[in-house]
Amino acid sequence: MGKTITESEIKYIPKADFKKRCLSWEDFKKKAGERGVKIIDTRDSVQKGFMSQSDEEALDGVSIEQLEKFRAENKKFLAALGKRKIMSQSFDMLQRHVIGNKRYKNQTLLIVDQVGKQVRWLMYQLEAAGIKHYYFLDKGAFSVIGSQAYGNM
């Protein structure tokens, strides 16, 4: 988290506390419709189905078909979250642009990663920053889309 800490300073967050912050897809969508909510997509470009033109041209027909299906499902996934602008932030930039930014301290944050594992570590940073209103999509975008773009590459 950007600083050296001693073992006595470590506050372990039990898995049960983490699970309380994980919302089902239906609850996540519902909360996304509330006023003042900020949605943050932490997936990297590959996880969102973006690749270079040369990499895409190198795919075989089946892989291209799977990638296009993923992209269509990803587009539906994002559209289901409403007309709000979804902030795309890598984990590296999240600390600087969101967690370290006072304007987000009292805002409700809805955070989605690829499979729901990276956000567990993110919870430590959110707690350390004093952010109280945040939730994760349980099992990440994969739980809704059902496939991963990079599985096709």
Image (spheres, rainbow, N blue to C red):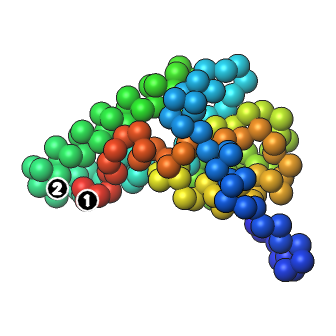
The answer to the question of whether label 1 and label 2 lie on touching residues, with beta carbons closer than 8 A, is yes
Q: CA distance from mark 1 to mark 2?
A: 7 Å
Residue 146 point in image, percent of width and height: 34, 44
Query: How many labels were placed on the picture?
Result: 2
Residue 135 vertical position relative to residue 149 in the rendered view, above or below:
above
The tag earlier along the polypeptide, 1 or 2, is 2
Identified at 73% across, 45% down, the residue is: 98
Identified at 68% across, 46% down, the residue is: 20
Looking at the image, residue 67 sits to the left or right of residue 33; the answer is: left
Task: Give the residue at mark 2.
Answer: 59
Residue 75 point in image, percent of width and height: 38, 32
Q: Quadrant of residue 40?
A: top right
Q: Nearer the viewer, residue 136 or 107?
A: 136
Residue 106 visible, this orientation:
yes
Residue 102 vertical position relative to residue 96 in the rendered view, above or below:
above
Report the residue that reaches farthest toward the left.
61
Q: Nearer the viewer, residue 151 or 18?
A: 18
